[in-house]
Image (spheres, grey):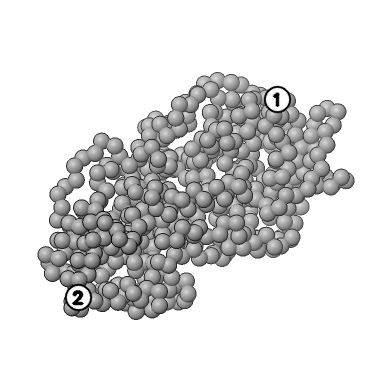
Amino acid sequence: MSTALPFPIASFGALALAAVMTCPSQAHAWQDDDAPVFSILAPAADAETEEAPPAELPQAERADAPAGPWLDRAAYLAARGERSEDVLRTRWRIETASLDGTPQGSEQREIVIGDGYVTEPGDEANTVQDFATGRLLTRIQSLDGPVMRNLPIVAHAHRQMNTFAYYTQGGELDEVTGPGGSLFERFWIEAAMGVRLTEVEMETSEGEDGHVTIRRFSLGSEIFGFDPDGTGSLAQAGLFRAWMRHALPIHPDALNRMPASAGIPERFSFLVFSPTSPDGRRETWTRLNTSTGSAAFPWPENVPPAPAVGYDVSDPTVTRLLAAGLEAMNGPMAAAPTEATFVAASQAAQRRADPAGAYLALYQVAHHSGPCRPQSQSAVCSRMSQVTAAGLGNAEFEALMTALSDMQDDRAAAIARLRTHLHREGFAGAAANMLTAQAVAAEQAANPEALPELSPLALFAASAEADPYAPLTYWHAGRYAAGRGDVESAWLLFDIAVGLPGSDALPPTREAVAMREQLRTLAPGFFGPEATR
């Protein structure tokens, strides 16, 4: 199994995904539902077992698992570690004006900075940017009351980069066309998305009153300016700047000119050009007051984590995948299958004179711990040789073997044979659906009109429902979702893949870390100060 990244993050041309925004203040104006997507496709129980003994430690409390969407409030706070309850409350007046100075509006907002997080209590979305865990928490209303949605920050950074890549054609265009046909210099979508390919040269000057002005040219207008007064600690100032990166359309190279040592500014302003402000506007933020205090982390007690249906997804079958994965992550560790479980399932199939089912039940272990290697001494790998020898001469078994050998050279024939096994349950059904999903995804990538009656996501979901503990099911499903432009769902599925037992030895864990680090390198402002993580 290849350990190469499933998609080349550093290649912006390959990141042209649908512009579905998550930060209204800077992204919704650039949304385009017709944006193209790219492909990141991979090549690719009937068990009679004793009931697993209960376990004291659920998957959600594994020390190496991410602070994922399965965590309840107590487990999430435990994942944050020992943190202070000290907060810095800041209230701001925001004034918007046209470029000729005509007032356009005024409002007030409160920004609260805690230990490793920033939140805006008056925000309708109730979003918490938790840079300590790398998560975006949003309190939403469900039919049963409020719940907490939990998305990785890396998904938002990925979305911003994809949108930038789409409008600039991979960073090639110096002038971009926004929704509605508005033309903009690339600089302004770099500001809106917080992403740029190369550093933009700027000029910085400081007036006698201490006001710092940042211009693109010596005679140009101030694109960003601030009045530093040293308010807050270095950590608090760094967190506030990270919040600005998420919430405000300020060019990353301009924002980088405001060091944490300057503190939280007393006042700042910036220019905006966007589809909703094609003639430009200036926003001026003035800090009205600052106060210190103590407050619990803003995940209220008695608010449970959002269920799978609480997440916005591009396809309802993704909800089925999330539901299976969240249930597995909240289950006991001992519920995850072991080699003995797979062997028992295979033996049960053999007793029913079903060598194809016996082989598929063993094959499913590859989606837990990777394929069998030469000279492997594992019980499952040894058993596969025995099942293969015993199955020779059985027409259904030999057809299955032919299908597996045709996966690369004759996918259509392989899919036709694999479809006869989709009715299976347990590990055999999980393997059959997983294999078919990958083959159908690859076939449809080569020929979009092929097999319209088959949905790879539905097949991935069926596999996860038959065996919810297989990390590679969620990993490949996430790759497919990302290829369809749903990077938010993709990163949730990656969370599950990395959090499940046994995943630490699989490519998904290494690839997830590599992808996150590449995104952090290309768009560091989204992830907050390193000292807070």
**Which of these two is toward me, 422 or 118?**
422
Q: Is residue 23 visible?
A: no
Please state, as top left, top right, bottom left or bottom right, where the N terminus lies in the image: bottom left
Name the spot of residue 504 as percent of width and height, x first: 39, 47
Q: Is residue 467 visible?
A: yes
Q: Residue furthest right?
A: 219
For badge 1, the amino acid type reads: Gly
Report crowding for label 1: few under 14, some 14 to 19, many 20 or more residues within 10 A (C-alpha).
some
Name the spot of residue 239 as percent of width and height, x first: 60, 33
**Which of these two is toward me, 228 or 389?**
389
Callout 2: SS? loop
Q: Is residue 363 above or below residue 252?
A: below
From the viewer's perspective, is the residue at label 2 or at label 1 nearer? 2
Distance of label 2 from label 1 (alpha carbons): 78 Å
Residue 230 bears which disc, if any?
1
The residue under the point 81% across, 39% down is 204
Sequence-earlier tag: 2 or 1: 1
Q: Is residue 400 above or below residue 210?
A: below
**Location of mark 2 (residue):** 392
For badge 2, the amino acid type reads: Leu
Residue 308 shown left or right of residue 20 in the figure: left
The residue under the point 36% across, 39% down is 62
**Which of these two is toward me, 22 or 212?**
212
Callout 1: SS? loop
The residue under the point 76% across, 37% down is 225
**Which of these two is toward me, 311 or 490?**
490
